[in-house]
Image: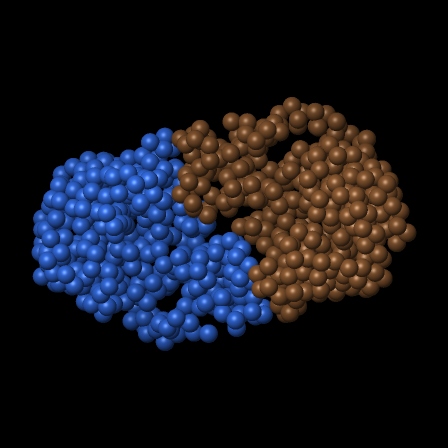
Chain colours: A brown, B blue
Amino acid sequence: MFSFKINKIDGNARSGIFLTPSGTVKTPCFMPVATAGSIRLLTSQEVIAMGFDAIILNAYHLFLKPGLDVIRSCGGIHNFMKWDKTAFTDSGGFQIFSLPDTTVDENGVSFKDPESGTRFYFTPEKVIEIQQVIGADIIMCLDYCPKIWDNLEELKLSVDITIQWAKRCYVYHSKEKQQLWGIIQGGIDTRLREKCIENLETLSFSGYGIGGLSIGEPWEKSLEVIDFVCKKINKSKVIYLMGLGMPEQIVEAVELGVDFFDCAMPTRIGRNGTTLSWRGKFNIKSASCKDENVPLDPDCDCFVCRTYSRAYLRHLFNARELLGMRLNSYHNLYFISKLMEKIRKSIESGNFQDFKKSFFNQYQRKEQYA
Amino acid sequence: MFSFKINKIDGNARSGIFLTPSGTVKTPCFMPVATAGSIRLLTSQEVIAMGFDAIILNAYHLFLKPGLDVIRSCGGIHNFMKWDKTAFTDSGGFQIFSLPDTTVDENGVSFKDPESGTRFYFTPEKVIEIQQVIGADIIMCLDYCPKIWDNLEELKLSVDITIQWAKRCYVYHSKEKQQLWGIIQGGIDTRLREKCIENLETLSFSGYGIGGLSIGEPWEKSLEVIDFVCKKINKSKVIYLMGLGMPEQIVEAVELGVDFFDCAMPTRIGRNGTTLSWRGKFNIKSASCKDENVPLDPDCDCFVCRTYSRAYLRHLFNARELLGMRLNSYHNLYFISKLMEKIRKSIESGNFQDFKKSFFNQYQRKEQYA
């Protein structure tokens, strides 16, 4: 029902096919984020048409809203949001540990819903139950995500609890047609990462998320950790870098062996007027766009770039027309979809290094290429 | 280049074809509102695909944002917003007279941009120039729109100034491939409406907007005025009821002879969670929708009703997901498009009264049919 087949290896980068009950996922794969059951401003149909094979949702958010009863009444998350391809849910550990009133003990984690003020207690078992009701194809263990990257005591604790909870999740999970993946914690401490991997590998999960990155550490440190984890985990397992997926990060992490990405940034920055292009980030609010009757990105063939001008997109933003947020979000996700396609193609033809070089020749890491 | 051909008359209701340089408009016609160059949250392509032949924009808003230079650089409003069918612009008289710091003299009107604080002075000639640059197919004279419906002195003044300004607009307008329509003011005083019509008819505009309604008067009074105006104006002229277009209003005004409508309500109420259906307004926020895995309107075949459930639409609204606003707006406009189609068909087959009866048998005027 589930399988992961690596078709080609190019250096440490690999391309393959991950099969789930909802279909085929071409890897390396970027998953648009549909936190609460919607990819912001876009329909599931549009995101499928762009070429995405999988999305990720958040169990913590869906538990609070709309609640499990509603999702159950609507026949599970695929039917609820009319997404008929592969769906992941994250446990929501990251979000719960980011809340101000969260306390943790060995048995589970207590948190307060910021909107209603109601307090909830999640155990690893409870989080599995929630995700079984939601019904995604792939679900994640409850993990302890540290708040900052350089507190060794907290990192140690987070690894110990993450390991215990992963074991409990593994034992408790029973749903057919659903696969449970583990999450590797340990911050930038490779000995802690190693400990986490060794313990989780005794359970032999089919896939692993790399958690606890992008919490303040420099990107070079993240890359070291990603490299370490990819080398340490059995090559047959799927590797998923959680929460990171700006274009330059994707290219560099694919090189190290990552298979899955998710990131809310492409749509989030789009809603704020920043668009992605092959030359780097591009701020559509810029005065230089005021009367530019040219496409947002001349090298892009998406609906927005084929149809509208920079002047129009800038105007929509200035006039606070929500259509502007919608069109920017569409373009940014389309861009990422094309990036993944190029990455996969370059690996399959053994040219990933050439692709990487030409990508970074064009793509500026600075905020605006103008 | 412009022509209005009435194909069928059924009582006072009529159906026909209004030809413009941008194409064919089937009447009675509802125009979605694209105030600042965007039909809120929807693309021009989606609105065309729903079957709409014309939209209306606002010259005052477009003058302030994005400004005439930008629209000129982008080749006019059709190209700017990629709307290749018929476009109208209203002068913006209604909006300008609604501002707190507006003063009027015989020569023109002075107002303050609420956002920048800059003061502008619009004459009838200036408003024609603005609309010539914007480049809609049909443009409207600058009119004096009274603020309240029952101040006879202001009504008299508004009619006198509206007549003078219409004459100046008529003389000044010079753009080929663009038609100028007059606006009838006079509140609910039929003698004032008559005076306005008689004066404007000496200029023989091809079409007339009925302005100055929906400013506090009861709907029955509006209907009396609409009836009076439709009967008084030469039957060969196009009649456009400005700013009114909820389903029940459309049906009742078509019966009196109205050809064009525009109204921001269908999209505005959609953004607030109220949807239209053949049974009346329907509040998607209602608790009763919580776990209803059924279409918003079982009698509607739009993309939203064919795809999503009430439970999902309610959830999107509750979770403040902007996709909810987008889907409600889409459905509501689609509903109006189908309503206009049914109205035209019933007139063409001489069954408008039967249609009206069956429409109101189903359609509840109250806020929620539950």
Task: Describe residue B200's horizontal placement relative to residue B9 as left or right.
Answer: left
Residue name at image x 47 percent, y 43 percent: A324
Q: Position of residue B177 (x, y in %)?
A: 26, 38
The relative height of residue B284 versus residue A41 in the rendered view (above or below) is below
Residue name at image x 73 percent, y 42 percent: A149
Q: Position of residue A147 (x, y in %)?
A: 70, 47
Please, which residue is most extreme toward the bottom here? B361
Q: Quadrant of the N terminus of chain A?
A: bottom right
Q: Quadrant of residue B210?
A: bottom left
Q: Position of residue A150 (x, y in %)?
A: 74, 40
Is residue A52 shown to the viewer in this render?
Answer: no
Task: Describe residue A215's horizontal placement relative to residue A230 as left or right.
Answer: left
Front one among A126 and B279:
A126
The relative height of residue B76 versus residue A174 in the rendered view (above or below) is above
Q: Position of residue A40 (x, y in %)?
A: 56, 50
The relative height of residue A137 versus residue A217 in the rendered view (above or below) is below
